Amino acid sequence: MLVELGLDGTAEAVYRTMLARPQHGTRAIAESLGLREDQVRLALDTLSELTLVRPSYESRNELRAVPPALGMEVLMARQQAELAARQQRLEVSREAAARLIADYAALTPTVSGPGVEQLVGLDQIRDRLATLTRDVRKELLGLNTDGAQTAEAMEASRPLDEELLDRGVRMRTIYLDSVRNDEPTLAYAGWLATRGAQVRTAPMLPTRMIVVDRKTAVIPLASQDTAIGAVVLTSEGIVTALHALFETIWTSAQPLGSGSVHDKHGLTAQQSATLQLLAAGHTDDAIAKRLGVSARTARRIATDLMDRLGARSRFEAGARAVQQGWLPQSA
């Protein structure tokens, strides 16, 4: 029940027992739960690290359970700090990905080299992707920056996705949060999940990307128009870096079946991302592109945030957000 807060089943059982029977020592707790004493001591170490137990005020050699109202508040604060740290790592990864993409975007269509294969035009891209997905053996990872998917694209993808899942290929895909508002895309992602694929969403994604069996990666030459061209990367170092980027984003992304998660300021991930983009001076069109929403939706989100902050301009909204702790000082 409390696994999400860092407690395993044994530690939770020991904690509940200490709350119900505060005078029980290690031996009594072990006997009541049918555990060995060393298992109880290990659970007490975990509870101590999480500040859910403390020395007794009456006897410094004994431990007492911290009341849940206090203990849970500490655990939630710790999780908030860890979430902020993960978000910071995600931003660093995005910057690294942007630099990597910029390096390869500078390549001309006629240049290829060791570990780099240039694809020019939609026909070459789709033919090469078909070959790669046909040959995948274990795992297919994807970042999808397109937002709501067209009916044509989903219909074309279904047979291939079904064939891969039937073969036991592990599929993990991250869409933009905006797909949660598009019923056809949401239905398709839900269908993928019922077939065994894992689907999550994130407020922003650095680029469209596919990683095959941790050996090959495909990214577009231009994020603004993915049909212009792409590069197929097989260099071990680059593919490892792109795989690490995917895993970082996956850790912070939300499972498709979950509801919207709000931070301690009451912001959704999409609102928080919008606020960061506002503070960085992006226009409504730029924000819409990054979030995979319409310019009207981006404008509405920005206006709502400015109203909540009592700001009359985007610059003032960014300043107030920093002052109120909604954004880090470096934003």
Image: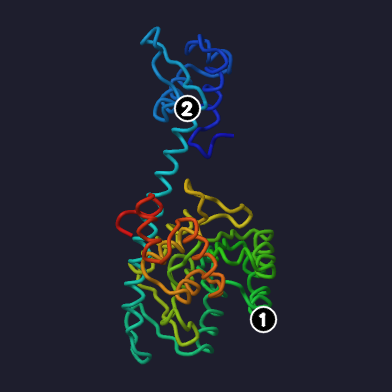
**Residue 36 image position (x, y, % from top left):** 51, 18
**Residue 288 image position (x, y, % from top left):** 50, 73
**Residue 272 image position (x, y, % from top left):** 46, 58
The residue singled out by tag 1 in the image is 152
Q: How crowded is mark 1: few (under 14 residues within 10 Å), some or many (20 or more)?
A: few
* Quadrant hosting residue 109: bottom left
**Which residue sits at x=48%, y=19%?**
65
* 1 or 2: tag closer to the N-terminus: 2
Residue at the farthest bottom position: 110
The residue singled out by tag 2 in the image is 70
* Quadrant hosting residue 31: top right
Do tag 1 and tag 2 residues touch (Cβ < 8 Å)?
A: no
**Which residue sits at x=43%, y=61%?**
275
SS category of the residue bearing label 1: helix
**Residue 25 image position (x, y, % from top left):** 48, 11
Q: In the image, is residue 71 above or below residue 208? A: above
Q: How crowded is mark 2: few (under 14 residues within 10 Å), some or many (20 or more)?
A: few
Q: What residue type is labelled 1?
A: Glu
In which quadrant will I find the N terminus?
top right
Q: Distance between the residues labelled 1 and 2?
A: 53 Å
SS category of the residue bearing label 2: helix
Q: What residue type is labelled 2?
A: Leu
Considering depth in this image, is 180 or 14 the residue closer to the camera?
Answer: 180
In which quadrant will I find the C terminus?
bottom left
**Which residue sits at x=41%, y=66%?**
313
Considering depth in this image, is 89 or 319 the residue closer to the camera?
Answer: 319
Labels 1, 2: front one: 2
Could you say which disc has been placed on residue 302 in the image?
A: none
Q: In the image, is residue 183 above or below residue 65? A: below
**Which residue sits at x=35%, y=59%?**
319
Considering depth in this image, is 141 or 24 the residue closer to the camera?
Answer: 24
Considering depth in this image, is 118 or 63 the residue closer to the camera?
Answer: 63
